[in-house]
Image: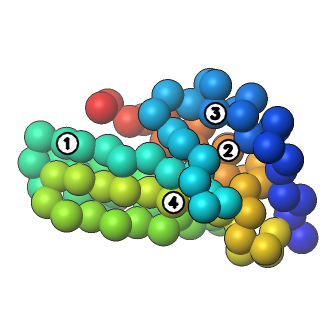
Amino acid sequence: MSQAWNPEQIEQALSQLEGWRFEGDSLKKTFTFANFKEAMSFLVRLAFHAEEQDHHPEIFNVYNRVELTLRTHDAGNKVTEKDVKLAQTIEKFNWR
């Protein structure tokens, strides 16, 4: 079972994750792309990384906008190291 992070740990992680926010016991970020094709390309790439880490985000997509929510189910739907690690991975390949 994963260990939920305390507010100080989350705040420290967010200082290194541009555009991410802590909301509703989750890490969240909205990405806006030039068009639907770019948004889908981003999501396909995300899918490979999420599967590799065995940690899957909640995804909402409309046309060129992608909203991600990260939280860990086995930690009571709280933020854990898994969420921060996936957010860091996303920032490494995100071109927006």
Which residue is at 56% across, 31% downward? 17
Residues under numbered marks 3 and 2 in contact, where contact means CB atoms less than 8 Å apart:
no
Please report whichever mark, 3 or 4, sits nearer to the chain's N-terminal start.
Answer: 3
Secondary element under disc 4, as helix, strand or loop, is strand
Which residue is at 30% across, 32% downward? 96
Left or right: 58 in relation to 3: left
Secondary element under disc 3, as helix, strand or loop, is helix
Q: What amino acid does circle 1 point to? A: Phe
**Residue 69: assigned label:** 4
Secondary element under disc 1, as helix, strand or loop, is loop
Please determine whether, in this image, residue 49 is positioned above or below residue 12.
below
Left or right: 32 in relation to 88: left
Would you call the spot at circle 4 few (<14 residues within 10 Å), some (14-19), or many (20 or more)? many
Please determine whether, in this image, residue 30 is positioned above or below residue 95.
below
**Which residue lies under the disc numbered 2?**
84
**Which residue lies under the disc numbered 3?**
14
Please report whichever mark, 1 or 3, sits nearer to the chain's N-terminal start.
Answer: 3
The Cα atoms of the two marked residues, 1 and 3, are separated by 22 Å
